[in-house]
Amino acid sequence: MRRVVGCVLPFLLLMLVQSVTVYAEQGMAIDPATCLGCHSTKISVKAFADSVHGKNACTSCHTDITDLVKHMTKTVKTQKVSCERCHKKVNSEHFASVHAAKDVTCANCHTDIHTHTYWKNDKRKVVEKCSQCHDKGKEFQLSVHGKGVAKGNPDSAACNDCHNLHAISALGPKGSHAEREFHTKVCMKCHSDEKMMARNKVFNVATKTYLDSYHGKNYRLGFPEKVAGCSDCHTAHAVLPHTDPQSSVHPNNLVQTCANCHAKATPLFTKFYSHGEHSNREKYPILYYTFIGMTGLLLGTFIVFWIHSLLWMFRGFIENRERQAKLVAGEHHHVISDAHKPYRRFRPIHIFLHILVITSFLGLSITGIPLKFSDQAWAIAMMKILGGTANAGLIHRICAVITFVYFGAALVMSFHFLFIRKDIKGNFIQRLFGPDSLCPNLRDVRDVTAMVKWFFFRGPKPTFDRWTYWEKFDFLAVFWGMFAIGGSGLMLWFPEFFGMFLPGWAFNVATIIHSDEALLATGFIFTVHFFNTHGRPEKFPMDFVVFNGQISKEEMIEERGDQWKRYEAEGTTEQYACTKPSSAI
């Protein structure tokens, strides 16, 4: 009996193979049951049937197997499966990925291809797959993100949320633009979603406060490689709450974390509010009241001087029309002999210092304004023209040095004026409040009152001495600006030095002051100062006195009549006469 079965069984098997081969040659798939006849020891029939590929025949993937006899006798070597035949989109993503570049194929990740089931957006399966090769998997699983994924929280970040499933791009060399951008960009995908953060009870202003910081502004302008990103402080995979002793942002670990960029960081330095909100009065009262104070100063200054300029513009226009009407009628308000004879108003040193002011101011404005408005498209384009934030920062600091130079010169000249000059009469106090001084005095109160009366047609236009009240304001604003902008700028320029004796939150305060005071200075110069100097009806379109140092006799009598009268009483008018008028050459 055994002999009969031994002869018949091979014959039946051969007949079965030949019949299946015929069907395959006619374009029909080989019955999976036939395949499982041999492969059932490695492939579970039930598991394969329940898998995502269960409705496919074996030859749907193993398309090279068309002759069962050759396959069974291993006459033809079995080829690798081409998943792209069905998974075209996924294959195109994988083809351009870092995995494909390193010869990591579909089967390297999908080792359970015969039992593979749909993941149903269960991120735990993703983490499990990635952890098969990547040793960061354990570190991630212990993180706040990993624990959230383990609990089945769909909002918690898994590997695919940052790196994608198949379109996994190479980060590039360490420190490169792509690598630095990645370490912040992927974090913002979730942390900028306020609804997601709210339902998970996560600090929901992290993105906004980061983007408002110097680091975030550089990132937004397109230069993340120059500043710290999210993972530089919080790490990429071992993200833990700040209360966890193992966290990189735990108070005990902050010095080490900050020292990654700021080598001389101190415990005081780490008091910096990384995500401080100046709008949160309860949590950050110092920032809140600093912002309120600076905003009040900015709005108050603009409101007062813009109203002053508008009233002056209207009243000056009326006055010019009145003068024109008198000229048409053959009249003139007064006749001045040698009306166009030039007199010296500024010395060459004053002209040189003003050129320094113009140069430094324009340089500081051009390089600082894009940082202030980093969320605007024009600011991004402007920063690219400047060659990036590093170049802009260098120009900004050079202009800051120029600012300190002319400020130092102003201090020396002020000391010389008060204590050394021989041509100025009186003691220190008399010089300080005298007519040649830029220090405000009671005369300025009378001048302001007279000017307002003139605005409203309640009195004649006042004449001034050497300095007007708005010129004194401009001069004193330089002193205030140097302490506000210059002092805060130095703190932000040398944070490690100042962090040795100042608490870190002082840099938050310095940022608010520097930003708002710079905006005030820029807005004031381009609107109020330019109007007072060049845009007022009496001088439009340009007053060249600051470039040539000369003023005509007529202008001096009309604008600074009291100064002219004082010089006449002293008999010194001709000491200021210019022997040669200024020219373009």
Image (cartoon, rainbow, N blue to C red):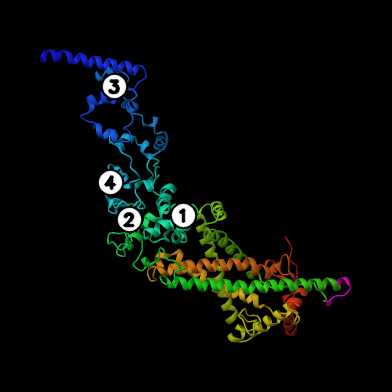
The amino acid beneath tag 1 is: Tyr
Q: Which residues are magenta?
A: 327-335
How busy is the neighbourhood of tag 2: few (under 14 within 10 Å), some, or many (20 plus)?
many
- Tell me which numbered mark, 3 or 4, is placed earlier along the sequence: 3
Label drawn at residue 219? 1
Q: Are marks 2 and 3 in contact (CB under 8 Å)?
A: no
In front: mark 2 or mark 1? Answer: 2
- Secondary structure that dominates the magenta span: loop
Label drawn at residue 77? 3
Label drawn at residue 239? 2
Label drawn at residue 135? 4
Marks 2 and 3, how far apart at CA? 49 Å
Marks 1 and 4, how far apart at CA? 29 Å
Is 513 drawn above or below residue 149 in the view shown? below
In front: mark 3 or mark 1? Answer: 3
- Tell me which numbered mark, 2 or 3, is placed earlier along the sequence: 3
Q: Are marks 2 and 1 in contact (CB under 8 Å)?
A: no
The amino acid beneath tag 2 is: Val
Marks 2 and 4, how far apart at CA? 16 Å
